[in-house]
Image (cartoon, grey):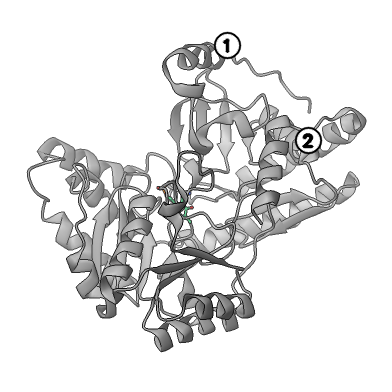
Amino acid sequence: MTATLLSNAADQSLRARAAKVVPNGMYGHESTILLPASYPQFFQRAEGAHIWDADGNRYLDFMCAYGPNLLGYNNRRVNDVATAQLALGDTMTGPSPHFVELAEALVGMVSHADWAMFCKNGTDATTMAMTAARAQTGKRRILVADGAYHGAAPWCTPIPFGVVPEERAFIAKYHYNDIASLEAAVAEAGDDLAAIFAAPFKHDAFVDQLLPDPAYARRARELCDQTGAMLIVDDVRAGFRLIRDCSWELVGVRPDMSCWGKSFANGHPISALLGNDRCRMGASQIYATGSFWFAAVPMAAGIETLKILRESDYLEQSIRLGTVWRDGLDRAARDHGFVLRQTGPVQMPQILFEDDPDFRVGFAWGEAMLQRGVYVHPWHNMFFCAAMTEADIAFTLDAADYAFGAVRAQLGSLEPHPVVMMMLGAMAGEH
Ligand code: PMP
């Protein structure tokens, strides 16, 4: 099969208009500035496992909106409930009864949790966790793993333009999975340690993913118990994608708080901070609110999504399909003389190329996949959704075979991407 050249006239026109009325035309990782040139910026529609760009090109979407799409876009059951609630009311003067039911549902599913608080974005949840930990302990220092993403607030944004050092004065780093570095950071914090943050597994951009070493997770728990600090698992990205519980149940460690977002209402805008009774007082003291945090529609959608998660085999299916994909991609890459580094859980795969330090091969592969109607990401972990089928996986493996061949044919003429080079330089400087 050959590739078709995709039209992008509508996307180009939107970009030109955006450049005039939006700084840089786009911001955050939704900007395609860090993606291959042919990646579309704007999308008009999504259904099941597919997205349509502004020009009407359809892609099988392995980004799932960077995580929120867990059951499939426009899931009928979730959206019927959401639409029914919308007809009744959404943002009102106070929350709807769904507020209580959703808190009960989450506390019922997540073993470590005794309480829930709702907010809008993952950054709200991680920032509230930090604040609640400080309120609870009366201490200041927060430990985070270097390279981990916890959101876009001044205390944690990876690109700190406009952030003054004082805003990060009490944030210190350790290396994920490295007990000695964690112990050293705890010792350094002395009697001023408020919290240790941990991602459920290392899912940083641009690098291989790493599953948590259970000994590291247990040590983090012990250190918090010894010092009185709060252990916080940031499950915003991986929540309910590894287990129907907090992800660290898989390593037998219960945090004091966990942060949730993205997928538990299948794309409806809501996030949550869950916690145990050790930090209920701190959580009850902080001032936390937002105009849209109590909206009824996302809460109704969340309750229905959680029901589906409990009733269906969405998780087992994503692991089954993810395994077929990983094995098939490995074989197809080898057939064309490439070695892939596929890391992390199969249902949240990071796919990098061996011997591709400036990502030029990965970018070219992504562009070739896109031409064949598959949206993959060259440096961020990807996601499976429950709407993906065996036929979809077979389709992508066929596309991958084409794409590896296409990249092999242009290998000598590939160029590094200037913005990615800048980004990698900045990351190297920070470490
Ligand atoms: N934590 C993690 C682990 C995330 O992946 C993200 C978002 N990618 C966030 C926090 C922040 O979430 P949001 O973008 O919804 O603020």
Image side of residue 337 versus residue 291, left or right: right
User: Which residue is rendered at x = 27% and y = 71% of the image?
Assistant: 107
Question: How busy is the neighbourhood of tag 1: few (under 14 within 10 Å), some, or many (20 plus)?
Answer: few
Marks 1/2 in contact by CB < 8 Å: the verdict is no
Image side of residue 294 versus residue 260, left or right: left
What is the tally of numbered marks visible in this picture?
2
At label 2, the amino acid type is: Ala
Which image quadrant: the C terminus?
bottom right
Is residue 18 at least partly visible in the picture? yes
Quarter of the figure with residue 216? bottom right
Quarter of the figure with residue 257? bottom left
Q: Secondary structure at mark 1?
A: helix
Which circle marks residue 403 in the picture?
A: 2
Residue 111: image x %, image y %?
35, 77
55 over 105 or under it: above or below: above
Residue 412: image x %, image y %?
92, 31
User: Which residue is rendered at x = 71% and y = 43% of the image?
Assistant: 425
CA gap, disc 1 and disc 2: 24 Å
- Mark 1 against mark 2, which lies toward the viewer? 1
133 over 14 or under it: above or below: below
At label 1, the amino acid type is: Ala
Question: How busy is the neighbourhood of tag 2: few (under 14 within 10 Å), some, or many (20 plus)?
Answer: many
Is residue 244 at least partly visible in the picture? no
**Residue at numbered disc 1:** 9
Residue 94: image x %, image y %?
8, 48
Residue 180: image x %, image y %?
63, 80
Image side of residue 101 versus residue 226, left or right: left
Q: Nearer the viewer, residue 189 or 223?
A: 189
